[in-house]
Amino acid sequence: METLWNDYPQNVPNMDLIDQLRAFVATAQTGSFTAAAEQMGVSNRLTSKYVAELETRLGVRLLQRTTRKVGLTPSGEDLLARAPALLDDLDALIGEVSEGSKGFGGVIRISASVTFGEIWVTGMLERFARLHPGLSFDLRLDDRHVDLATEGIDLAFRMGRTETRSLKLRKLGIFRSVLVASPDYLARRGAPATPEDLVAHDCILDLNRRNPRRWSFGPDARTVPVRGRFQVNSARAAVELAAQGQGLAYAPRFAARSALAAGLVVPVLPDLPGETSPLSAVWLEGRVLPRKVRALIDFAAGDIRQADLL
């Protein structure tokens, strides 16, 4: 890509280059000129014009156009891997200069898992937003680990271990899993006295767990195989099924907290500590972290402790 930047014609103003890059990134991420135009708040025609000008400037085709959608060429893939970071750094630079006198402004794009996002992240962002009225927020809830670079995410809240080398992280805490069942289920089936007794019980499998069919308990991490009629991809759904008497659920404490408080489920094997896993704020390595994102991470670290969810 270096030759592309060095060889483009010099007859187009550089401010147009910024608009062209924004149009390209929006089109590539949304898959259509129409959606990109809506995202940018400009006309469909102008978005297409910006992308065409960028292709002329670079001397390569970036998008493959069809009647229904657009796709990326190899050159387009190369540019998309780097352009969002360049634009974000530019926005951060401008924001850093202006924030000193005006306070934080602009958009923070955040990613989190669905259940954790609904239970804590949304409320935390609302509390943070009250302190910073100049900020806007774009929250994406998805149980997959999204690619922060290609999707333009500033900050992600992730549960579990993050092994991607391109990410930096700040550990916010450790969440623990709890084994729960409804009083009705335990009255019908009896309560297991040891982890090994789970083989005789209906267990609700959460496919988001690292090992959904093998549950570990106690300081020595005793692991037992489990099975059951229900498998879901949501800790909250697993707890709800347990509350309906359909079996035992093994879920993060934050997902079971309200059901436990309401007495819909009760702890099972409470003397054995459940599995633990870290909760972290993660962002791209090698990027200058804007002050507004650093402020959000600091706020989240304090807020999660006060929420008593972990």
Image (cartoon, grey):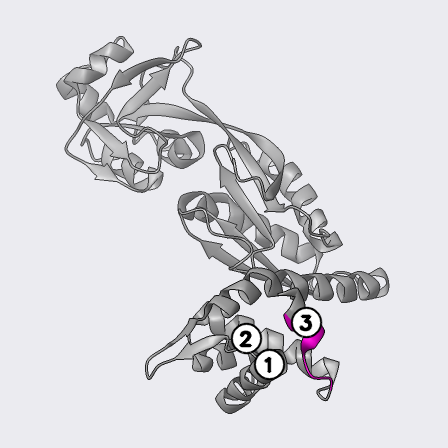
Q: Which mark is residue 80?
A: none
Quarter of the figure that contains the N terminus: bottom right
Closer to the eye: label 2 or 1: 1
Closer to the eye: label 3 or 2: 3
Per the image, the residue denoted by label 1 is: 54
Per the image, the residue denoted by label 2 is: 24
Q: How far is the residue under mark 2 from the one under mark 1?
A: 8 Å
Magenta-highlighted residues: 4-10
The magenta stretch spans residue 179: no
Q: Amino acid at mark 1?
A: Leu
Answer left or right for 71 relative to 282.
left
Residue 255, position in %: x, y? 40, 36
Q: Nearer the viewer, residue 12 or 28?
A: 12
Q: Earlier along the polypeptide chain: callout 1 or callout 3? A: 3
> Disc 1 vs disc 3: Cβ atoms closer than 8 Å?
no
Q: Amino acid at mark 2?
A: Phe
Residue 42, position in %: x, y? 56, 85
Q: Earlier along the polypeptide chain: callout 2 or callout 1? A: 2
Residue shown at 42% from the left, 33% from the top:
257
Q: Earlier along the polypeptide chain: callout 3 or callout 2? A: 3
Q: Which mark is residue 5?
A: 3
The answer to whether residue 191 shows anywhere in this view is: no
Q: Judging from the image, what secondary structure is the residue with disc 1 in?
A: helix
> Disc 2 vs disc 1: Cβ atoms closer than 8 Å?
yes
Q: Amino acid at mark 3?
A: Trp
The magenta stretch spans residue 9: yes
Residue 249 to residue 144: above or below: above
Residue shown at 32% from the left, 42% from the top:
234
Q: Judging from the image, what secondary structure is the residue with disc 3 in?
A: helix
Farthest residue, direction right: 101
